[in-house]
Image: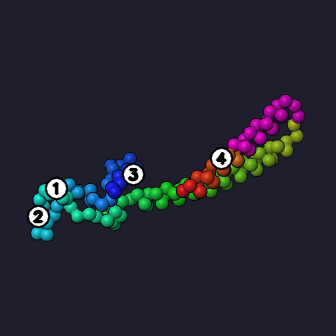
Amino acid sequence: MDTICIIDGGPPTLHGRRSPTAFGPATLSGGSTTPSPFGALPTPMFEASGCRCHETARAGRQRIIDLAATTATVTDTARTALAASRGIDWEGNAALLFRDRLTSIRAALDAHDGDAAATVRIV
């Protein structure tokens, strides 16, 4: 089965049992070309000059893992700031609203960390 890959918005690239020139001219042993309904010989799916799909996928996977690690560092720093803010000596309605907002921010940080971890598990 053939696969078509589109990388970085570039042109579609055909990979699989047929070469991208499968219906173009075939090169004969004498070096001449002639239109052939049989096309060129099949090429390996991942020849040296062929598909960049695996490298692009590997680089993307590594980028996601790196960003998830960075996310954990940033959210830990935010949690430290939230903990320090919670200890402010302050009373009244504004203080209650402030503390409620801290709680909602902490919940959002937990959800974000969970989403980042789930994404790393998927890739």
Residue at (19, 59) in percent of width and height: 39
Quarter occupied by residue 70: bottom right
* Residue 37 coordinates in the image, percent (x, y): 16, 56
Q: What range of the chain is rendered magenta? A: 91-108
Q: Circle 4 — which element?
A: helix
Give the spatial CA distance, label 2 vs label 3.
33 Å
Is 13 placed above or below 48 here? above
Residue behind mark 4:
112
Q: Considering only order in the chain, which callout, 3 or 2, is on the residue closer to the N terminus?
A: 3
Q: Which mark is residue 37?
A: 1
* Residue 119 coordinates in the image, percent (x, y): 58, 52
Residue behind mark 2:
32
* Residue 17 coordinates in the image, percent (x, y): 30, 60
Residue behind mark 3:
7
Please tell me whether residue 99 belongs to the stretch shown in magenta.
yes
Label 1 neighbour load within 10 Å: few <14, some 14-19, many 20+: few
Give the spatial CA distance, label 4 vs label 1.
55 Å
Mark 1 or 3: in front is 1
